[in-house]
Image: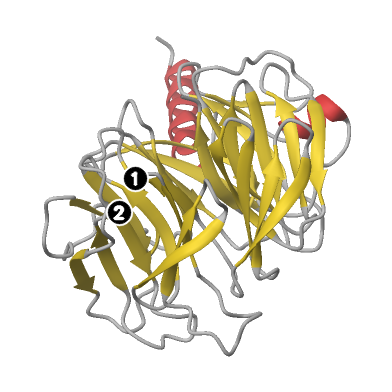
Amino acid sequence: MKLYRIVFLLIALLTMASCNKDDHFGEVIPGDPDYRYGHGVFILNEGNYGNGNGSVSFFNPDSLTIVNDIFYLANKRPLGDVPFSMNIIAGEGWIVVNNSAKIEIVDLSDFSSKGTVTGFTSPRFLLPVQSAKAYVSDLYAGEIAVVNMDNLTISDHIVTNCSAEQMLLADGKVFAAFWSNYAFPDSENNFVLVIDPGTDAVTDTIFVGKEPNTLVTDNEGMLWVLCSGGYTADENPTLWRINPADLQILLSLTFPGLNSSPSALCCNGTCDMLYFLDGDIYGMAVSDTTLPQQPLIESNGRLFYALGVHPETGNLYVSDAVDYQQRGVILRYRPDGTAIDSYRAGIIPGRFVFIP
């Protein structure tokens, strides 16, 4: 082989190596119809608050491709301001768009809009509680909206006198976290509401740490509540394990650092492992009685923002919000913490929704 061909080959190999290190392959250019919904994950990109540039991406782990801004591609209009959470229900996606104060319903076969629910103040999460009834939590309203999923209207409200964040159904009860007291400064945001979905009434309160932000249930049906300790580091963060049947506290773990701010508690598919963010990514078994001392995955200067676990593979999906201005990065890791790959999504990727 001639010398110039060897040099050319070396340059090409070095170029490919540098691209694989720094660039993000697998992105389907907007407008290219060559993708399919199915086995994959939707990524909700919050966008910049007040700018109305929120979007949804779709990642296919089989073809290793990501398609960005799929709502706009399907409907030729923006989704809205801060798409915050999404539920997959009977072939439809129910997307809660926080600052647009609406829920957008889409057909998952092509992501075309099928309708909207309006009338909210600052909606956060939707939780189906019966065949045609769902609850929608709210940051500012002081009540939880009861939505009729058949006619897409708000049929009632549950008065809470506090904000409500993530909700979870366990042992026939709805648990709703009082996360932020920004609009309720006279209330101590250190409890979880218990609601009867049959009567739409608050029946009890569980006192936990300050600022409970995420809830999950484990493989024994026990409820876990992660508390950040407060926006201004009022107290040390805590992690609680609670029996949803009798509301008894089974375990309470306190983080050693006052300035820690853990978030994004989630489970693997078998619900025997917990993961959360606290600068880095941490993991622990549900049988552990102490908090992990070392991170499973170090951020290494990245701004980890959202976390999810694929229910089948156990692979971890985490977003890097970068600088909150440019498009964020989605990184995948195996359960043991080894890196797999990374992709560019939209601005501030804030939620992963896995197709069941």
Q: Are marks 2 and 1 in contact (CB under 8 Å)?
A: yes
**Residue under the point 24% across and 59% down:** 295
Residue with the most extreme top position: 1
Can you give x and y, in whole percent of width and height, for residue 224 in the image? 30, 57
- Structural distance between the alpha carbons of marks 2 and 1: 6 Å
Residue 36 picture location, percent across and down? 62, 15
Please name the residue that numbered disc 2 is placed on: 244
The residue identified by callout 1 is: 171
Secondary element type, mark 2: loop
- Looking at the rendered structure, the number of numbered marks drawn on it comes to 2
Q: Which amino acid does label 1 sit on?
A: Asp
Q: Which residue is pictured at 70% across the width and 68% down the height? A: 141
**Residue 279, quarter of picture:** bottom left
> Taking 129 as reference, is 191 left or right?
left
Q: Residue at x 52, y 46 (%)?
A: 198
Residue in the foreground of this view, choosing between 149 and 48: 149
Residue 238 figure quarter:
bottom left
Q: Is mark 1 on a helix, strand or loop?
A: loop
